Image (cartoon, grey):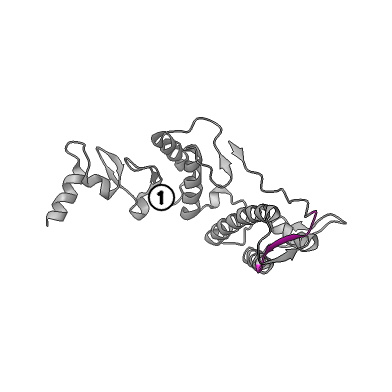
Amino acid sequence: MSYKTFFTFAAGLNKTLKVPIGTKESIQNHIDWIESTLNIEREKYLENPAHWKYNDFLNIKDDILCDAAEKHNDWVRWIYDGLADWSNKEPDICEEITNEDFQGFLPALSFIKVKSERWNGEYYTKRMEALYEVMRGRENEGISFDAKKLTEKQAAQVIILFSEFLDHEDRRLDVPKDCDYLASSYDGGYEWCEKCGAITYEHSLNCRKRGCPLQKQYKEENAD
């Protein structure tokens, strides 16, 4: 697999960057929020750039950590994509980010990793959805598949294989019949049929498999 480089600006800015008005305030607001939410502190050694102090987040509840990490990591990808775009094309209405400004932002422009044993159901689902997209040949979260893309069934089997170790909340992710996305029986994303396997309600109504028990059940319910 290949990973997109999000750290083109990791050493700082070599020139003042013009960005849409409000960007600096938006960046600072996010940084204040994530550092406050996860009790993140900064440290600096001699003349080296400041960075986030090591934090195992043991004093943070799993649900809060997973939610904050998901939002922050999405934000980091968005910021780096934005910086790349703005460095190539100046916005019409803009303000400036100097290298001094950027050095203050830099410690927060890193991804937060959550240990798999702390994943909640939502975080697990997001990670597997991203992995499924990559295995199907579609870049996701900056990750792309360097091998021949897997079929829907093959990619689903990989997800199911990982579920024994990662699915702590029994989300039971699978790819419904004739679909190309992950769904969960936890929230009604699919039903399980003894003949068809994972299948959505809509697909079960038009199932071509002879004697499909779900199709029979739903037709009887609709007839009532």
Quadrant of the frame with the N terminus: top right
Is residue 18 one of those drawn in magenta?
Answer: yes
Q: Nearer the viewer, residue 31 or 78?
A: 78
Question: Measured from the top left, where is residue 215 in percent x and y?
Answer: 19, 45
Residue located farthest toward the top when viewing the structure as drawn? 148
Instruction: Give whichever of 130, 188 is nearer the camera.
Output: 130
Which residues, given as a range, are shown in magenta?
14-22
Q: Is residue 44 left or right of residue 173?
A: right
Residue located 54% across and 49% down the image? 117
Secondary structure found at label 1: loop
Residue 103 in magenta stretch: no
Q: Amino acid at mark 1?
A: Arg
Question: Looking at the rendering, which quadrant does residue 196 occupy?
Answer: top left
Residue 12 place in picture, x, y as percent: 78, 54
| Residue at 34% over, 43% down | 176
- In the current view of this chain or complex, which residue is farthest to the left? 224
